[in-house]
Image (cartoon, rainbow, N blue to C red):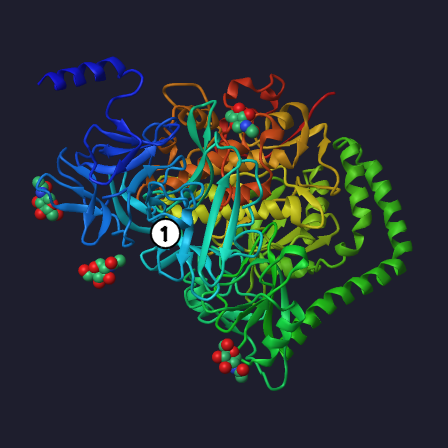
Amino acid sequence: MEGLKILIIYSFLFCNIRTASTRDAISLGQSIREGETVVSASESFELGFFSPGKSKSRYLGIWFKKIATGTVTWVANRDAPLSDRSGVLSMSRRGNGTALVLLNSTNDVVWSSNIVSRAAQNPVAVLLESGNLVVKEKDGNDNDDPDHFLWQSFDYPSHTLLAGMKLGVNLVTGLNRLMSSWKSADDPARSEYTYGIDPSGVPQAMLKKGSTIRYRAGSWNGLHWTGMPQLQPNPVYTFEFVSNENEVFYRFKLINSSVPTMMVINTIGDVQRFTWMEHTKKWGLFARFSGTILDHCNIHSDSPDCECLEGFEPKSPGDWYMLDKSGGCGRKTPLNCKHGDGFLKLKTVKVPDTRYAQVDKNIILLECKELCSRNCSCTAYANSDVRGGGSGCLLWFHDLIDIKVLPEIGQDIYVRMAASELGKIERRKQQRKAKQVTIIITSILLATGVILLGAIVYIWKKKHRNYGKTDDRQELYSNEKGSSKEEMELPIFDWKTIVDATDNFSEENKLGEGGFGPVYKGMLIEGQEIAVKRLSKSSGQGVEEFKNEALLIAKLQHRNLVKLLGCCTQRDERVLVYEYLPNKSLDYFIFDTTRSKVLDWQNRCHIIGGIARGLLYLHHDSRLRIIHRDLKASNVLLDNEMNPKISDFGMARAFGLDQTEANTNRVVGTYGYMSPEYAIDGLFSVKSDVFSFGVLVLEIVSGKRNRGFYHADHRHNLLGHAWQLWIQDRPAELIDKSLYDSCSLSEAIRCIQVGLLCVQQIPEDRPNMLSVVLMLSGERSLPQPKQPGFFTERNLPESESSSSKQNLSSTNEISFSMLEAR
Ligand SMILES: *[C@@H]1O[C@H](CO)[C@@H](O)[C@H](O)[C@H]1NC(C)=O
Ligand SMILES: *[C@@H]1O[C@H](CO)[C@@H](O)[C@H](O)[C@H]1NC(C)=O
Ligand SMILES: *[C@@H]1O[C@H](CO)[C@@H](O)[C@H](O)[C@H]1NC(C)=O
Ligand SMILES: *[C@@H]1O[C@H](CO)[C@@H](O)[C@H](O)[C@H]1NC(C)=O
């Protein structure tokens, strides 16, 4: 009795410093129960009993103690919860060995570590600084060698991978260390999502749901997973991949132990990397990839819009164009091994699934090619290690599944092709080259003609000087000079053909009114449907835009840009002929309560992605750097599969590749989509298009127009509304109600975040389209957005209000040109 009293006083006295119930080890015969914990040496981690979230069940687990108290990293009895607070963890003899066992109130074993079969003399369980609970020989000299512990929790990961933990397989014992997600925030039981290393064939990192692959990071290429080039040396952690006959694993180590980082697989199967941020005292999300989208399809590039590689075609084209791509692609020309096949080189890809591939690390690429061409069932080869210019040999013997062309760095692969197919591909290349050569010759021959034309244009220009300022024109013509050869590639339609096709521009065929004149639907005699844009004679400035558009768009080819088929001029008539897109424009759907149901979340994601890729092409990948300057919902047309196509290049400007910003006195564009620096100062750059894109993304997700947005609580426009919701941590409220059934919340929030990043006030803060595309695909972590520009309509400059009256009242936004006195 006396002894007990003293103990209670003792614990009272010291409870502020260290509760009497913590210990640093459990020796044989000792145990801990509710209220008692085991703490690592400098109190980084703690082991004890807890209940997650709203759950009443008790679990034995490990969590961060010093920082982020309560962040659970490991759970022992995740599949066998204790129903009350009577659990006891003890170190005891089991059979002829020793084990850590967790007993419930009826003394039944709920969980136990594997029996330590070695006749341990004095086993002791200790929680290490790394968060690893280990059983080791108390006085052993193998104390901290992870390969010599009698047992360790690091061998049985829950949903968290901490620094020093191996993710992978011990090929000798068969032990597979996988991360597996909790069922819910209240239930740490194993769910179906796992992330780990699949050792079959050439080992790959894979995110699976049950046995289905959801995401394949791919094989290790010496530097990183082939599909994850963003895994780069960084200031927070180092990483390694080991693959030998005994084991295959990935592991990372902290560079500075006071800046911890961890990987977590969450309940919806997203793998996320968090790093502790001391200044905010929070875990910052630094990278993630998703298990919610099945990112795995047959021979293709640029998933999720799978495409067949050159020389391949969809096996069942009907399904393919209905977006069911599970049938995959087949060869246009079958292989013919005896008569010699060749190889087509594909650059910067994520190499295909290697579960059935073979590797030889000791040979060079030339020997690899030799091996592959000698074996008729070999379908492709590549270097297995890309370091130092490449070494080693990977060989595929099956269908090539899940090839992805990466926007940045990737590795090269050589795909087997029938010689005749290679010939065709080569011929197409040659033709493209030959065309260029003839064009050059022709253009020399026509040089005098061009000079003459120049003179005529000059005179004509003088006559029309009163339309717009000349600086715009000069820039246009200087671009024109370098590219006059392409101009000739544009097919010229006969005036009569156009008149016949549109039934002499009849009212019935009128589709609408563009910025510079009416647009008609037409049908050529061959049955092809076309859209005909007729420049209205009254619009003087339109002549400029007409030439501009014809010149620019003729040079652009991308599936997310509307295709110009040709042009036609007759006296003072000017006509552009486009492919006809039956599904009208995006604004027709998203802003209408009934029609918006047609575009479910998948469609909208696809549309956002398509617009982003179209813009990426304009900004970075086309031969000219092109700024569209009038991106908006009504300029995004939809084809019959709801693929988005950017249209209306009347205001687009070509930049030199080294030019990043320009100034104009003539501000053209549409209010609601214009960035502040452009609307106010006439400064435009790729970042002004990014702003418009951001507005468009927020409009697509919310189904509301930025301009004319009304909310009872405030006077902000859509951007301001989105921003308010964002900073109040309620972004989900922005999502269009008609999307509730089809929407993936995490994807929608990602889109909102990308949208907000794009509309940030300062152009330099906005991401470029390359980053946007990566962010949308979930392959890049997202920074926190800063305050958007123009989030209240009222901060527009005074001068514009008069010239935009028509826009204020009109719901059908019309592009305008503004001549500003400077
Ligand atoms: C432990 O006992 C089992 C049988 O009970 C025996 O097969 C095994 O060899 C023993 N292991 C050691 C390490 O003594
Ligand atoms: C203890 O565990 C055993 C075996 O799992 C179970 O049958 C028993 O009901 C548990 N006792 C309590 C009080 O939960
Ligand atoms: C480790 O990080 C802490 C906190 O950010 C910092 O104070 C310390 O200087 C860093 N140590 C080293 C060696 O970089
Ligand atoms: C081609 O390679 C496969 C896979 O290694 C092998 O099974 C087959 O025997 C080889 N064929 C020939 C003709 O060498």
Disc 1: which residue: 178
Up the image or down, 707 lies above or below 626; here it is above
Q: Quadrant of the N terminus?
A: top left
- Residue 770 is situated, as x and y percent measured from the top left of the image, at 59, 44
- Residue 29 is situated, as x and y percent measured from the top left of the image, at 20, 39
Estimate how packed mark 1 is, as few (under 14), some (14 to 19) or many (20 or more) residues with alpha carbons within 10 Å: many
- Residue 56 is situated, as x and y percent measured from the top left of the image, at 17, 34
Q: In this view, does 377 lie to the left or right of 198?
A: right
Residue 241 visible in this rendered orientation of the protein: yes
Q: In which quarter of the image is the C terminus?
A: top right
- Residue closest to the eye, 570 or 400: 400
Q: In this view, does 168 lie to the left or right of 652?
A: left
Q: Circle 1 sits in a helix, a strand or a loop, which is it?
A: loop
- Regarding ligand 2, which quadrant of the image does it lie in? top left
Q: What residue type is labelled 1?
A: Leu
- The quadrant where residue 323 appears: bottom left
- Residue closest to the eye, 699 or 286: 286
Up the image or down, 299 lies above or below 341; here it is above
Residue at the image position 54 percent from the left and 61 percent from the top: 351
Q: Residue furthest bottom?
A: 338
Up the image or down, 629 lies above or below 585; here it is above
Residue at the image position 47 percent from the left and 63 percent from the top: 245
- Residue closest to the eye, 117 or 388: 117
Q: In this view, does 174 lie to the left or right of 57?
A: right
